[in-house]
Amino acid sequence: MSIQKQAYKAIEIVAGSKYTSDDPAVCEGYRSGPGGYESGLGYEKVMTTIPGAVVMPRTTEEVSKIVKICNRYKVAYVPYSTGFYGPRSHCHVENELLIDLKRMNDFEIDEKHFFITVGSGVIYSPIQQEALNKGAYVVIGGGGAQASAIANLIGDGWSPLSHRIGLPHRRILGTELVLPDGDIVKMGSLAEGSDPFWGDGPGPDLRGLLRGFTGLRGCLGIVTKMAIKTLPFQPEPLVPTGIAPNTALALPPKRVKWVNFQMPNKAAQVKAMFEIGKAEIAAAVTKVPLFWRAIAKAECKEEFWEIWGKETEETIKNFFIVRVLLVGFTSEEQMQYDENVLNDIMAELGGIPRPTKPSDESWIKNADSAGMWLMCGSYVSVDYIIESLTQATQHGESYADLKRKYTPPLMPDNGDPGWFQSFELGHQGYSEFLVYWDQDEDTNGVDHFYLETAKMNIRERFYTSLLGPHQPLYLTGPKYGPNYHEWLLKVKDAFDPLWVCHPPVPLSHDDFVNRAEWMHPLKDWESPEKLPMPKW
Amino acid sequence: MQTKNELAKIVGKDYVSDSKEDCTKYSQDQSLLPPGMPEAVVWPGTSEEVGKIVAWCNGNNIPVVPVSSKVHFHGCTIPKQGGVVVDLSRMNKILEIDTENRLVRFEAGVTWEQLVEELAKKGLRPIMPLLPPGNRSPLTDTLEREVPTNIVYDYGEPMQSIEVVWPNGDLFRCGSASVNGFPESKSRGANPSGPGLDFYRFFQAAQGTMGIVTWASIKAESIPRIDKILFAPVDDLTYAMDFLYRILPRRIGQECLLLNNVDLAAIAAGKGLGDFESLCAKLPPWTLILVISGLLRRPEEKIAYEENFLSQVLKHEFPKMGLTDNLPGFPGLGRQLLPMLRKPWPTNVPYWKNSIRGGCQNLFFITKPNQVPAFMDTMETVVAGYGYPASDIGSYIQPIEHNRACQVEFSFFYDPEDVNEKAFVADLYFEAANALLNEGAFFPRPYGALAPIIYERAAGYTMTLKRLKGVFDPNNIMNPGNLCF
Amino acid sequence: MRKDEMYDTPKKKVALDVNDLNNFVYDMDHCIKCKGCYWVEHTYMPGVNFSTRCPSNLWNDFDSYGAFGKMRIGLAVNEGKLKWTDKLLEIIYADPLCGACDVGCKRNLDLEVELTLEALRVKAVKDGAGPMPAHKKIAKNIASKHNQFGSPAESRKKWITKDINVAEKADMLYFAGCSASYANPDIAKSTAKILNASGNKFMLMKDEWCCGNTLYSVGMIDDARELAKRNIDVVKASGAKTLVTSCAECYRMWKVDYPKMLNIATADLGFKVVHLIEVADEAIKNGKLKLTKPVDVRFTYHDACGVSRLSDPWTPWSGERGWMGTVSPALKRRRGTTGLYAQSRNILNAIPGAKFVEMPRIRENAFCCSAGRGTKEAFPDLAKFAANHRLDEVKSVSAEVLVSACPWCKSNFNDAVKENGDNVKVMDISEIILASVEI
C-alpha cells in the first residue's frame, strides 16, 4: 500500500528520501488508535486508516509543493502536527498521504512586543518556558503542554488562564496558510511585509478561514507559521520541583498564588465568578470537578477508584469549589489588592478559603493533562463551549441528566455536572463536559451519547462546540445560522474543488453515521442521499 | 423608477426615495474621494426588510451600499457604481443590555451618543476610539476595527455575536447568537466565533462588501469609580516610547495616548483654555495622557498601587518624564479632557478635526512603538518635499494592548472649498502613504486611494480575498469599487 | 458506585512478564499518543532547545521511532499483521531502552512502556527475526570469552595495579564489568582505590563473566537468564553481602533484570546491589571518605540511565485485570523515582575547588547517550548522534568536563569528543572523586 507512484516520486524529491516513506512499519506507527483522544470509538474504527505514505517537510515552500503535487495526482492528504487530537487528525481514506509537520519547528520571540512566532511542530511547554523566561506567559490549551500551539489555536485553545484572554482567535497574529490547492496566503502584517506582529487585515479578515468554533480539523489548508500573542506576566521565576510523577512549579508567593474557596452552594459559586469578573481581578477563575481532586491524590488508577468509589451524589452536590489564580502583574501591592478584593467577595458570599498548595501542577505548564486518561483508559471532551457565564453555568446540568442514560459505558460520576469557569473577565463563560469509558467495552453507547448531546444542544438552544466536522453537518447546519453548513460547504468547494485536503472532512461525521449501522436508529434529520463531495 | 417601486413594496413608500435631493446627500462625504450617485435610497426598519432589499438587488444586478452613520470620513459609503443606498438609521434600537454578562446588543443605526447614554444608566460604558463623532454608528466603528484609547484589557476585541444579511439576502447570525430561536435561548450571544467558519471575520473592515450587519453584541465595561488623569509634556518621543514599554505591560492605566500640540489644541480649543492658535503655540510638542482608574471594589487601593508603581519607575528609571496630575501651563485641562475621553464628540459642534480648516484627511497605520520616531522622520521628509509645514500636521499615537503595537495617525487639514488645496492634500497623502508603506508601516484598513496600493502589495491576500468574495457575493453587488472588489 | 452503573467486565490474567507480549496488549492499546515518552517532562521543559529525551525519535523523526509509534507497531506485530523486515527490526532495535519513555508516560498514566519494548525484542528473537547481526556477534563473544568484546578472558583483571588492595574474602564484592575491565580500566582502578580509601574491604569474582546486559536487552532472554543464574550463584558462593559496581548498565542488570528474569524480587537476590555512587555518598557522609584536594574544573553531570530512571528495584507481579483496566492484587508501579540523583549530587557538590553546573535536562529528564544495551554496536550512527546532541548541551552550559557514572557513556562521549575536537574532557564519577582524595 502506498500513494500514487508518480506523486510519491515527486514528493520524495521535494522533501528528500530521508523524510519520505511508504514502508508498512513506518506507516503503522501513524495509526490513530486504538488509544487516545476520542479513540476506541466508532468514528475511529470506521473512519480512520493508516497512511499510504508519510512525508515530513521542513518549510512552507515544501508544504506548498507537496500539496500541489497531491492536487495534480489526486492524492488525498491530511496535515498532522502531533496527532494528539485523535482520529480527526489522521488519515480517513486509503492511499492517503500524511503530512507530518513536526520538522517545522522554528521559533522566535519578540520580547518587547509580546509575541512568539512558530511553525506547526512547536508545542506549548517550550513556548511557555521561553515566554516565562522573558516575563510573559501564554495560555496552554486544556489539551496540554504536548499540543502543537498552532493546531490548538486553530482548533480549540483555552484553559483557566483564559479568564483574561478567552477566545484564542484574539491571540492569533500574522499567519501563513497553504490553501488546499497549494497556494500560500499570508495574513495580517505578513500580507504586506515580513514582521508578523499584527493579526488582522488588510481589510476583511481571512483568519476567518482558519477555524470556526471549533476547528475545521485540517480540511481547509495547512497553517505552517503563526505569530501568537503572549501576555505580560510578572518577573519572578517559577521553579520546577520534584521528581516525576510528582513535579510542580513552585510559585513565588508574593507574586503568584492559587487560592481555593469552598462555597456554600452553586448559586454562590456562580455569583463569585461574576463578581470576580466585574472586579476585574485574577488570572484564572474556575470550578473544579470533584473527581479531579481524586486524580490529584491518586498514585494509580486503582487508587483513584478507591477514592472515587467513596463519593456519592450527595457529596458531589455539596462540593462547590472556586479556584482562583492571583498574579501580581504590576507589583506585590497589586496582588495584595486582588486578594483583598477577592476576600471581600468571598466574605459576602460565604466562601471559605481552603488550604492550597503554593505550587502549580496543572495550568501554567500543563504537564498533567494526560491524566485525563488515567481513570478509565479512554476520554473525550464531548462538548466545550465558550459562551456567556450564564449559559456556562447551566449547560453541564443538561449533560449530566442525559449522561445517566449512558452509564455504563460512561464512567459513573455521581451526576457531576462538568466544568465551568469565567472567560474574558466574566464577559464570557466556559463550560466543558468530559466523559470517560474503557474502549475494551461495548462503546456504541458512547457513540450514541455523543450524537444525542448535539441534539440536546439544539433542543435546549445552547451554543456548542459540536459544530462543523464534529457532528453531522446536516444535523447541526439547519439549526445554527441558520444553514451555516451551506456556506461552509460552498467555501470548501471554492477552495478545494477536488476535496483532496483531508477528505471527507467536514462531512466526515455525516459519513460516519451513514456507514455505522448502530448509528442508523438515531438518524432523524434530513440529509442528501449522496453527500455532496467527491468519492474517495 | 422601477427600483423605487419595487423597494416600496418592501419598506413602504415613505421609506424609499430616488429624488435628486435625497440621493445627493449620499454622494459625498468628508473624504477627498470623488462623488458618486446612488439611484435610490431606502430606509428599512427591520432585518427582514434589509434581507428582502438585498435579495431583490442581487437578483437585479443592482449594487447595495450600506450606511449606518451620519458622518463618514473614508469614502466607503459613496456609491461607486450607482446602486441603492441602504440607510440603517431607522434601525436604532438598543435591543438588550445584559448587566450580568456585561454585553450590549444594538442595531446598526444606534449612535455613539445613544449607546454611551443608555449604558451609563446601568453603570456601564463601551470601549471607545478617541472622540468619535456622536452620530457615528458604534457598530460600524467596532466592525471597522477603530483602535480604542483603552490599553489595559487582554482580550483585544469587544465584538461578540452579530446578525448579518448575506449578499443573497439570507439572514444569518454569526457566533453563539446563531442558536435557533435566539435570543429566546440559553445562549446569550457572547461568542463571535462560528458556527462552522468564523464568518464574523469576513465582515470586519469589509466596508459593507461582504454583506450588511444589522445588529451586534459588544462587551460593555463597568464605569470606574475613581479616575485620575495624568499628563506628561514630551519632546523626546523615543524616551516616551521607552517609558510606555516599561509601564504598560505592568497593566497600568485605562486610557493612554499621545497627542501632538496640533491635535490636542484642536480638541481643547474654545473650552476656556484658549483658542486653537494660542494652544498650538504653547502646548509641548507632544503630550502623554494617561488615565488611571479605581474600579468597582476598593478603588482607592487600585489607584494607590498604580501610583506607587509609577512613582518608583519615574524616580529610578525615567527621571525626565514629568508625569503629574496636570500639564504645566494649562490649568483645568484635566477636568476638561477626562469626561471627554469617555464620551463621543457632541454633534452640535463641529468635529474637532474639522474645526481647524474645515476638512481633514487622515492617514493611519499600525506599527511597533519603537519604530514611531523613524516614521515621524519619514513623514517630515515627505512633507518637506511638498513644501508643507510639518508643524501643521496633527499627530496621534495610540498604544495598543500593553504597548505590543500602536496606531499612528497623521491629520492633514485643508479648506474643503479650495479645490487646489484638496488636490494638493490628496497627492501629499498618497505619497506619504507610499513612503510609509515602503518603510514597513502596516495598513490593515485600506480606505479609498490606499486600497489599490495595499492590495497590490498584498497580492496573495488579495487573490484569496477575491476567491472568498466569489463565494458570498458572486455578482459583486455589495458596495463594489471598495477594497479590491 | 452502583452495580447498574458498571459493566461486569470479565477478568483477564496478566503478569509483568516480558516473555509474552500478550501481557502488554492493554498497554499498547491504551497509548494516547501524548508523547510524554518523547518530550522532556513539561514542568521541567527548558525551552525550545533540549526539549526532548528520546534519542531514537530525535535521530529518526518518523513517529514509528518513538515509543508511541512502537506501541501501535507492537500491536500489529502481536497480531501477525506486520512482517519482520529490516525496517521493522531497525525501528525495534535502534533504541537504547533508556527508560525515558517509561518514566515520561508514568508521570500521568499506568502503562508499562519499557516492559512492552523489552517484550517486543523477546518476540523478535523468538520469531527468529532478531536480534541484529552485531548483537549476535556480542552473544558469540560472551559465550566464548565471557566478555562483550571478544577479548581474551584471561586479560580481564589486567587493570589491577600493585597499589590496589583486593581482599581474599570480604562482605563487599566489586563487579567491574566488561567495559571497565577492558575498555576503561581507569574506572575500575579509580573505583577500587576509592573503596580502599574509604575503608571498604572488597573482593572480586575469581572468574568474572559479563553480566549479560546486551543479551537481555536485545531479547535473548534465555541466554541472559542462564548467565544470570551462573553469576548469582558465584556471588552467593562467595558469601558477599553487597555487590558494588561502577557501571550503570551492570547495576541495572544485577538489580532489576536479574530478579526480573528469575521472577523474584530484588530484595530476594540474597545480596544487596549498589553502585559506587551509593557507597561513596555514605562514606563521605560518615567521614570515611574525605574529599580534600581541589579539582579546578567547571563540570557538568550526565545521569546515566542505569543509575537513574531504570534503577527502581524489581518486584514480580501477576494478577488480573478487570473493570476499567484496574488490576488486582495491588500493584505499585516502578516510575523511576528512586534513581541515584541526590546521592551523586551530594558527592559532586562536595568536590572542592570545582564548579558544578547542571544541564537543562537532568535526572529523569536526562538524554541518553545511546551507547548502552547493544545500541552502539548495532547502530553506531545513533550512538554518535545522541552523544553529539548531549555534548551540545554540555557546551551550552560551558562545561569543560562531562562527568558520568558509566563506562559505556564515557567511551561513547570520548569517541564523539575526539571526532569533533570538542574542548570537553570526559570523566567518570569515580575519576573525579579520586582526583579529590589524598591517597
Image (spheres, rainbow, N blue to C red):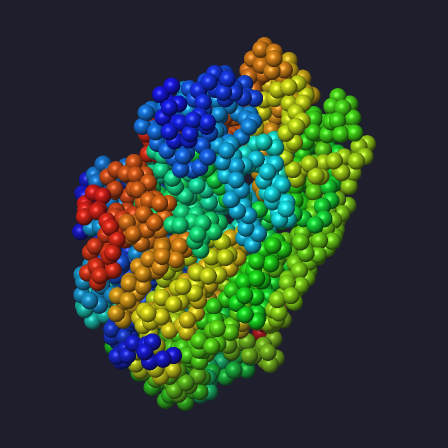
Q: Count the marks: how many? A: 0
On screen, residue C409 versus residue B377, left or right, reads: left
**Viewer-side residue, C161 vs B465:** B465
Quarter of the figure that contains the N terminus of chain B: top left
User: Vertically, is C155 above or below C411?
Assistant: below
Q: Position of residue C354 (x, y in %)?
A: 60, 63
Q: Where is residue B3 in the image (x, y as percent from the top left)?
A: 37, 22
Quadrant hosting residue A12: top left
What residue appears at the point 58 percent right and 33 percent down from the top-left corner? B407
On screen, residue A42 versus residue C156, left or right, reads: left
Q: Looking at this rendering, what residue extends furthest in the front direction?
A: B13
Q: Looking at this rendering, what residue extends furthest in the top direction?
A: B420
On screen, residue C315 versus residue A472, left or right, reads: right
Q: Is residue C155 visible?
A: no
Q: Can residue B87 be seen in this view?
A: yes
What residue appears at the point 49 percent right and 20 percent down from the top-left corner? B22
What residue appears at the point 54 percent right and 21 percent down from the top-left corner? B29
Q: Where is residue C366 in the image (x, y as percent from the top left)?
A: 46, 63
What residue appears at the point 27 percent right and 59 percent down from the top-left corner? A44
Quadrant hosting residue A384: bottom left
Quarter of the figure that contains the C terminus of chain B: top left
**Viewer-side residue, C103 vs A151:** A151
User: Vertically, is A312 above or below A361?
Assistant: below
Q: Where is residue A213 in the image (x, y as percent from the top left)?
A: 40, 49
